[in-house]
Amino acid sequence: MMEFMPAAKLALLAVYTCLPFLVSGQTAVATGCGLSKTPQSCPILTSKGYMYAQTTGGPSTQLFEPPLSQQDVACTSKPATCLVDTCDYTNGMTDLRLSDTWYELKPGSPAVCGHGNREFSFFAKKGKNPNKMLLILLAGGLCWDSGTCLGKTPADRKMAIDSLADSYLVTFSGNVQQLRDELAPAVPQALKNMIKSTTGKSTFETGILQQGSNFSDWSVVIVPDCTGDMHIGNRTITYDAGLPSCITAHHAGAVNTGLAIQWMMKYFPSLTDVLVAGTSFKQSKASGGSGGSYWAWYLQERYTTANIRSVTDSDLAIYGPQKKQIFQTDPWGTLNASVPDKSFLGNYVSPTSQLQGKKPNFLAQGFLLPAKNEYFFADDDKTYYIRYITSYYPSVIFADISLFSDLIQEQIFLQTGGRVHDCCYDGCSCTAQQPIGVRGGKYDWQKTQRVTIWRRDILIPNNYRIWLDRANPTRHFLLFWEDFVTHQLVVNDTKSYQTSTANTWLYNLVNSRVIFTTISTGIVVSNNLKPSNASICLGCLNGVLGSGPGEEKCLMSWGPGESSMSVAPMFKTDWLALWSLNGGDSPDLIISQSYYRFGHEYVILPGETLAEIANRFGTTETELTDLNYNLITHISNPYHVMAGDVICIVPHFAAALDRMGNPLCPSNLQTFGAQLPV
């Protein structure tokens, strides 16, 4: 008989009932929550509920009730290969004996889910084409403090949010059954159910996996994220130590994913094509699909001649201004994340002459991410990361598939300090009149989205493409929707890809190439990428000044009633500087043109730092970063600017320097109009 007992569920909720209101950015330490430091065995989920693990690793017949609570020290588990309801713990993770059949692979310790109380597993199928691999790194949600990793209630938790909907039956003696909610971060049961079918088929095989998809015959590895760190974490950390809201989070995403990829490399040694897809279930509300991008270079090192492509579904990695503060202490341990097998690192040789023999610095140490002085998740954006990685791995191609109105992406932007509306001109979201003398636009969601996409498209022409659709804002993720095969997009591409489906668009991109042509002066990098440019829904990116070919970058729209006198304070300059840039009969008159120049364009020279540029023009790194913020000339990290980039500068003449490094005004060391030394 089945008996539903809400009281049993309420008992499991007791730990959450007295938690205070939580604020993001709380101090994180590694002291623990006062729990046992002795590792316990991870409970094993069976059809009868969670069971104790035997010493051999498999489940016993003894019911594990109540389920293991959060752990300061992660629970331990053994490796296994599972088919239907049978797991082989004797031989650990093995090859896939049957083709076109789903298996569950358990790496065992040190792999674990985020509260340290559930074992981690991933899923794989050998397709008809064993040399082509679809590596799906699932989004699971992001967490960085007690409020997001634990939550005041389970429903508030952002770590492994897809398992929040899960429940399981507990069978007691007398065949009495209770339905329990899964309160801990865990591998979603929607994935575990994939292997239960005796036919090896799964209801999960929709979208990119369904029949009719160009990828339906590829082999597949699906790696969940149950650690809240986008597959790039390697740190156990305690938030709110000593408080009722204390939680020890095991950000082991890089460990879990690394073990899954290591298995893939062992049993699929001859891959010719790898598509790394950051996505999730079609009904998922998770964020964090960008994590897949960080593993592309490692795959290129292992499969040196393979086509490595990375597509991110519904995660443009757009964060608000508080991201720097939230992640400045590296709560996920991204700087400690290592790759699992270092034996082949250095095998890839860049085809560009200027990089032959040159390797990224982090390669020698075997870290997953660059050193902090070269790239840091807290300070740098994804656009910079792609530019950095493709400078060493120019054969890798990155892509985004996203929806312009995506409430989940908007939510993570707001959680990290952004706003829905912050301005009314130049790509902003509101359509009303903006107050005179108020710049705005630094925190506006729509403008930030538009600027990010334009910059990515302009700055990475040979290694990046985007499919941007306008759809129902409640829809999130595209790759696993049934209409992935049939959905068409009317875009701004004048070539033959105006009405291609998402399926065709992605397949064409996967089979495109970055081209390296040798000429007398070196190697020219170009591409035959299809589509030939960004596939963007009509009108979705309108309004961003300076985004078109040959357009001036340092422009702003005049608002009603504005003049040089009224807008000059927004840029920490004076009316005379603005008037001299724009002309006009009088600085007191309202200018009739649509736009005005607020600063000078400056092209960064090789080896030049933003500090040197700021010093020359009498300003500061902070002021230059603030001036360019959320414009087409946006500066993500003042310490990581690249030669050839254009930025806007508003000189402070009183503090500027001449070519000899002397103060420009006043200066008794030069005569205005005199010939400068050569």
Image: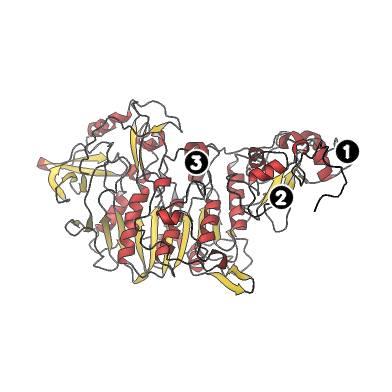
Q: Nearer the viewer, residue 220 or 526?
A: 526
Say if residue 398 shows up in the picture. Answer: yes
C-alpha distance separating marks 2 and 3: 35 Å
Whichever of labels 2 and 1 marks the residue nearer the N terminus, that label is 1
Q: Dot 1: few (<14), some (14–19), or many (≥20) neighbours within 10 Å?
A: few
Is label 3 in a helix, a strand or a loop? helix
Against 213, residue 183 (above or below) is above
| Res 16 → quadrant | top left
From the top left corner, tell me how far across and down residue 518 is, in percent: 59, 74
Q: Nearer the viewer, residue 153 or 398?
A: 398
Task: Check disc 3 and report the residue beneath it.
Answer: 411
Left or right placement of residue 603 versus residue 287 in this view: right
C-alpha distance separating marks 1 and 3: 45 Å
Task: Please state which amino acid type lies under the numbered disc 1.
Answer: Ser
Q: Nearer the viewer, residue 214 or 115?
A: 115
Q: Which residue: 72% across, 58% down?
A: 550
From the top left corner, tell me how far across and down residue 277 is, in percent: 43, 58
Q: Which mark is residue 586?
A: 1
Q: Which mark is residue 162?
A: none
Q: Specify the farthest residue to the left.
A: 174
Q: Dot 2: few (<14), some (14–19), or many (≥20) neighbours within 10 Å?
A: some
Which-is-in-front pick, marks 2 and 3?
Answer: 2
Task: Please state which amino acid type lies under the numbered disc 2.
Answer: Tyr
Is label 1 in a helix, a strand or a loop? loop
Whichever of labels 2 and 3 marks the residue nearer the N terminus, that label is 3
Which quadrant is the C terminus positioned in? bottom right
From the top left corner, tell me how far across and down residue 454 is, in percent: 62, 53
Q: Which mark is residue 602?
A: 2
Which-is-in-front pick, marks 2 and 1?
Answer: 2
Q: Dot 3: few (<14), some (14–19), or many (≥20) neighbours within 10 Å?
A: some
Which quadrant is the N terminus positioned in? top left
